[in-house]
């Protein structure tokens, strides 16, 4: 895994051009614009339902302590007093913003339905930045993996634990670590700082990943290589013994 001293903008500059992309969680399309300009995708699907439902962020019937900061500090900051009116404005803004780009397809659907609507084994990159609660993230990843080409890259936003993450009740880091253990994915690279992005793949030897790493090596970015066993991605293999019993083996 490469720990890159830069933000997500620095990471996406290392991708091969003309890939097939999907971004799940779009908001006003600011990062979508960067993907379009920097990566020059041949196709770019933008998936968002542009709706806000408070129950999607708090699984409890009451206002739990770990949720108390969300509504006041995060929800209002981004969506104001009428979140769905704000989200409708965001949707109209995105449609207008990318109307000139025929390679961009805007899909108004929640993350799981939007991902499921995509063709299988079609995408070089799935960028997931939707609901950041643990179960939502894990479900999005489980579906997104089916849409990636073998050796494609899934890039996750806000791979972070800390005061800011707790304030928003983020579950991205836990979901990613669960996913790589469950589906035998490997870490590729991670950006530096709070709210980092992390990239994973099912085949680190693929030509797409190799080209990403070659681009990174030839860049001016400072980065550090981290041995896989130091990253929390221990995998478990199912094994059947000669006597018919089964066991799980931890694989470093």
Image: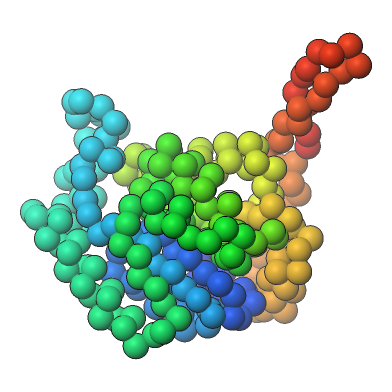
Relative depth, front residue between 238 and 205:
238
Relative depth, front residue between 229 and 31:
31
| Image location of residue 177, percent across then percent down | 58, 40
Report if residue 234 is visible in the image.
yes
Q: Is residue 9 left or right of residue 166?
A: right
- Image height check: is 131 above or below 252? below
Report if residue 1 is visible in the image.
no
Count of numbered circles in the view: 0
Q: Residue at x 33, y 81 (%)?
A: 98
Q: Residue at x 75, y 41 (%)?
A: 229
* Corner quadrant of residue 200: bottom right
Q: Is residue 142 left or right of residue 136?
A: right
* Corner quadrant of residue 100: bottom left
Quarter occupied by the C terminus: top right
Residue sitting farthest toward the left: 81
Q: Residue at x 74, y 46 (%)?
A: 228
Q: Is residue 130 left or right of residue 212?
A: left
Q: Residue at x 57, y 36 (%)?
A: 178
| Image location of residue 20, percent across then percent down | 56, 72
Relative depth, front residue between 3 and 82:
82
Quarter occupied by the N terminus: bottom right
Task: Check the image and tell me how it is coloured.
Answer: rainbow
- Image height check: is 223 above or below 196? below
Q: Is residue 191 left or right of residue 80?
A: right
Residue sitting farthest toward the bottom: 100
| Image location of residue 82, percent across then percent down | 9, 55
| Image location of residue 235, percent across then percent down | 71, 35
């Amino acid at each position: 895994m490469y720990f890159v001293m830069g933000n997500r903008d620095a990471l996406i500059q290392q991708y091969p051009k003309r890939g097939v992309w999907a971004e799940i969680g779009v908001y006003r399309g600011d990062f979508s614009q960067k993907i379009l300009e920097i990566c020059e995708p041949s196709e770019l699907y933008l998936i968002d339902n542009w709706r806000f439902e408070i129950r999607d962020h708090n699984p409890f019937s009451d206002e739990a302590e770990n949720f108390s900061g969300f509504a006041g500090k995060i929800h209002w900051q981004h969506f104001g007093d009428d979140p769905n009116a704000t989200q409708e404005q965001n949707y109209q803004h995105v449609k207008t913003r990318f109307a000139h780009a025929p390679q961009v397809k805007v899909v108004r659907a929640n993350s799981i339905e939007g991902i499921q609507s995509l063709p299988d084994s079609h995408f070089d990159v799935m960028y997931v930045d939707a609901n950041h609660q643990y179960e939502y993230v894990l479900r999005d990843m489980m579906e997104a993996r089916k849409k990636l080409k073998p050796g494609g890259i899934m890039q996750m936003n806000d791979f972070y634990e800390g005061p800011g993450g707790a304030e928003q009740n983020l579950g991205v880091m836990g979901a990613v670590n669960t996913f790589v253990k469950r589906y035998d994915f490997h870490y590729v690279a991670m950006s530096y700082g709070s709210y980092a992005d992390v990239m994973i793949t099912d085949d680190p030897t693929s030509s797409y990943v190799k080209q990403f790493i070659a681009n990174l090596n030839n860049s001016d970015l400072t980065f550090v290589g981290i041995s896989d066993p130091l990253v929390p991605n221990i995998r478990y293999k199912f094994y059947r013994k000669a006597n018919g019993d089964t066991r799980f083996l931890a694989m470093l």
